[in-house]
């Protein structure tokens, strides 16, 4: 009598079901991880903007600048946003604030402020926060 080599149909179906269960768990988690990455990009851009704003102010008698950034290379100063990120900076007499949104994370925004009243969702001066 010959020995059968290979898998039976039942064994293959069990493997396919197990892979389906694992995929149904992993795919929603992957979407959350991607969204967190987009928000981390927003926060990084806001931190880079803070460095750029303070460098600009130290060279211009403490004056901050207002600008809207939507491209990766901006000639206004040394700051440029990441791809898909839009940043709006608003200068005030004693400081500045900025908000950032990512095109791939709709409904979320991030903010940072220095020397101005808090801008939601930021709570602590100089620390970017996202909702």
Image (cartoon, rainbow, N blue to C red):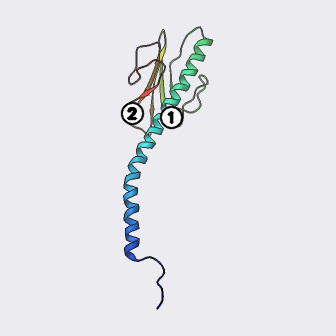
- Element marked by disc 2: loop
Which residue shows up at 43% across the image and 19% down it?
124
Which residue position is annotated with label 2? 108
User: Which is more toward the observer, 10 or 74?
Assistant: 10
Along the line of sight, which residue is nearer the eye, 62 or 1?
A: 1
Q: Is residue 124 above or below residue 13?
A: above
| Residue 47 falls left or right of residue 131 | right
Give the vertical position of 91 relative to 72 (above or below): above
Residue found at x 39% / y 33%: 108
Q: Secondary structure beneath disc 1?
A: helix
Dot 2 crowding, Cα within 10 Å, few <14, some 14–19, many 20+: some
Left or right: 57, with 5 as reference point: right
User: Residue 53 occupies which quadrant of the picture?
Assistant: top right
Residue 100 position, x and y percent, is 46, 29
Q: In screen coordinates, is 57 left or right of 114?
A: right
Q: Earlier in the sequence, mark 1 or mark 2?
A: 1
> Which numbered dot is residue 41?
1
Occupied quadrant, residue 116: top left
Q: Residue furthest bottom?
A: 1
């Amino acid at each position: 009598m010959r020995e059968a080599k290979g898998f039976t149909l039942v064994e293959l179906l069990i493997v396919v079901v197990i892979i389906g269960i694992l995929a149904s768990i992993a795919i929603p988690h992957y979407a959350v991880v991607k969204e967190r990455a987009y928000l981390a990009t927003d926060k990084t851009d806001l931190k880079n903007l803070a460095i750029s704003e303070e460098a600009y102010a130290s060279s211009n008698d403490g004056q901050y600048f207002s600008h809207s950034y939507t491209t990766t290379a901006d000639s206004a100063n040394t700051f440029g946003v990441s791809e898909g990120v839009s940043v709006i900076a608003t200068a005030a007499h004693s400081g500045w604030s900025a908000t950032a949104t990512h095109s791939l994370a709709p409904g979320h925004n991030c903010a940072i402020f220095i020397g101005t009243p808090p801008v939601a969702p930021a709570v602590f001066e100089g620390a970017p926060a996202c909702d």
